[in-house]
Image (cartoon, grey):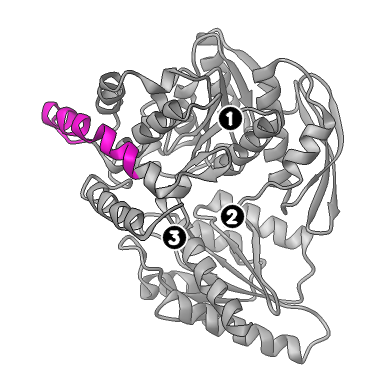
């Protein structure tokens, strides 16, 4: 049981971690983290791993893979990023976030090694590098039967790429983090293809022709075994259902019919298809239908097209690039029947703001721009100036903070619903920080309303 003292110690550890290089400051090398895990006895090699890279969908796929393995009675460790509320979310053991006391204990175990590696490197270990190593150690000490590891950024030089993955999974690749990964999808694909290990199994989501060529070349170079969506496996059918959808999948080793998925969006159906194929590739046989129904029937993907509030309906989504915004807009159009949509948007600096706005414009009737609490948040004024170029002055509004923006949008939406036969909704999006803070704000609103 977590005690107040555990939470105090966790706060101390988190403060130490935050003194290190942040996640948005990248020095593309595996040298530091490789030296650290070597000093720790290579914990990441003590259990098999599935490694996931791509532009969008990685965390959802990781959660689904984790859920399927747990239903198969595997002890699982899952490492994902970023988090919505607390960094403990990033390290999951058997489907639950790592307890604060276990996190602190593991950090204390490796602290001396951090100092040792820092003293020998030109730059000290980063926040993400330390969290990655901490997860590997926690999984080894549990111990887990399988590690499900999401790459943080890129692939080749991502801190997670010290694993010797039995299966690599690559979700759809688009433009994002171009300042680090490259200006074209081909360059980005080349970096993400770096997770492919020699003679391993590689599960690929459907990709553009340009990306597919790059990934295929790397698979051939590594003598890996490919499983490609649309060829070796595919989404056979999907139907909308209350609270989600029914999917049928042509898997690598067999077919699966009418699996309920309590998530919205065609992209989540494809994510589930990818997750099923990844587990099939690992175990080498057809999965039992009842295993998939139990695993995917209860899967969650917080902050991804999540209906978090009713009356009016409020949906939060962590879309932070044009690819994600396109998926959000497509799902709102095809799976919901809203008379009008109010948008609340806060993004981080350095993102393709214009691209995000252009994707959202066709489905959002009135947009409220704001800023979240991150020091990297784009100011409300800057975002407003960009938004009126796309939405026009009559459809664009500004609030100084996220809580005010959500309050304004929900109030306006409620007024519209009171005088209309249809139903309007609010969409809150723009970043993981925005999604996480919106969840807290809306949860407090629900509690206050009773």
Instruction: Give above or below for 414 relative to 218.
Output: below
* Residue that numbered label 2 is attached to: 302
Picture residue at 81% right of the left edge, 50% below the top:
245
Q: Total marks drawn?
A: 3
Picture residue at 61% right of the left edge, 77% below the top:
446
Instruction: Give above or below for 263 relative to 341.
Output: above
Q: CA distance from mark 2 to mark 3?
A: 12 Å
Q: Which mark is residue 75?
A: 1
Q: CA distance from mark 1 to mark 2?
A: 22 Å
Q: Nearer the viewer, mark 2 or mark 3?
A: 2
Indicate the quadrant containing the C terminus: top left, top right, bottom left or bottom right.
Answer: bottom right
Q: Secondary structure at mark 3?
A: helix
Instruction: Please tell me whether residue 168 belongs to the stretch shown in magenta.
Output: no
Q: Secondary structure at mark 1?
A: loop
Label 1: few (<14), some (14–19) or many (≥20) C-alpha neighbours in 10 Å: some
| Residue 30 appears left or right of 308 | left
Picture residue at 29% right of the left edge, 28% below the top:
33
Question: Looking at the picture, how far across and down is residue 177, in whole percent?
Answer: 41, 44
Q: Earlier in the sequence, mark 1 or mark 2?
A: 1
Residue 25 can be seen, yes or no: yes
| Residue placed most toward the observer, 32 or 17 | 17
Question: Looking at the picture, how far across and down is residue 38, in whole percent?
Answer: 29, 19
Question: Looking at the picture, how far across and down is residue 294, in whole percent?
Answer: 77, 40
Question: Looking at the picture, how far across and down is residue 326, in whole percent?
Answer: 62, 54
Residue 359, picture quadrant: bottom right
Q: Secondary structure at mark 2?
A: loop
Residues marked 1 and 3 touching at CB (< 8 Å) = no
Q: Earlier in the sequence, mark 2 or mark 3?
A: 2
Q: Which stretch appears magenta?
A: 104-124
Residues marked 2 and 3 touching at CB (< 8 Å) = no
Q: Nearer the viewer, mark 1 or mark 2?
A: 1
* Residue that numbered label 3 is attached to: 433
């Amino acid at each position: 049981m977590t005690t107040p003292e555990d939470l105090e110690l966790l706060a101390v550890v988190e403060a130490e971690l935050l003194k290190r290089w942040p996640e948005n400051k990248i020095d593309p090398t595996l040298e530091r983290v490789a030296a650290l895990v070597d000093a720790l006895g290579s914990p990441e090699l003590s259990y098999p791993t599935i490694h996931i890279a791509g532009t969008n969908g990685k965390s959802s796929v990781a959660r689904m893979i984790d859920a399927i393995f747990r239903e198969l009675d595997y002890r699982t460790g899952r490492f994902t990023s970023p988090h919505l509320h607390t960094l403990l979310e990033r390290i999951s053991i058997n489907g639950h976030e790592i307890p604060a006391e276990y996190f602190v204990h593991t950090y204390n175990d490796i602290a001396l090694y951090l100092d040792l590696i820092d003293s020998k490197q030109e730059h000290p270990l980063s926040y993400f590098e330390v969290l990655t190593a901490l997860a590997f150690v926690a999984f080894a000490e549990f111990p887990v039967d399988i590690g499900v590891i999401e790459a943080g950024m890129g692939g080749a030089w991502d801190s997670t790429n010290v694993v010797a993955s039995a299966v690599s999974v690559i979700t759809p690749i688009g433009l994002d983090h171009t300042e680090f990964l490259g200006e074209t999808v081909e360059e980005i694909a080349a970096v993400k293809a770096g997770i492919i290990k020699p003679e391993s199994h590689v599960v690929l989501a459907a990709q553009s022709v340009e990306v597919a060529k790059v990934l295929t070349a790397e698979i051939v170079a590594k003598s890996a075994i490919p499983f490609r969506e649309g060829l070796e496996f595919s989404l056979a059918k999907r139907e909308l259902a209350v609270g989600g959808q029914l999917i049928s999948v042509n898997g690598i080793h067999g077919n699966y019919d009418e699996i309920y998925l309590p998530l919205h969006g065609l992209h989540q159906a494809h994510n589930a298809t990818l997750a099923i194929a990844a587990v099939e590739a690992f175990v080498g046989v057809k999965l039992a239908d009842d295993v998939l129904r139990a695993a995917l029937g209860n899967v969650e993907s917080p902050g991804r097209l999540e209906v978090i509030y009713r009356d009016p309906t409020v949906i939060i989504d962590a879309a932070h690039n044009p690819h994600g915004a396109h998926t959000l807009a497509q799902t709102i159009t095809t799976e919901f029947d809203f008379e009008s949509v109010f948008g609340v948007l806060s993004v981080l600096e350095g993102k393709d703001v214009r691209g995000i706005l252009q994707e959202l414009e066709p489905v959002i009737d009135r947009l409220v721009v704001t800023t979240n609490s991150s020091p990297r948040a784009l100011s409300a004024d800057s975002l407003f100036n960009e938004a009126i170029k796309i939405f026009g002055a009559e459809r664009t509004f500004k609030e100084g903070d996220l809580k005010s923006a959500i309050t304004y949008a929900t109030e306006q939406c409620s007024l519209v619903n009171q005088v209309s036969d249809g139903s309007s909704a609010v969409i809150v999006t723009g970043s993981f920080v925005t999604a996480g803070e919106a969840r807290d704000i809306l949860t407090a609103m629900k509690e206050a309303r009773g």
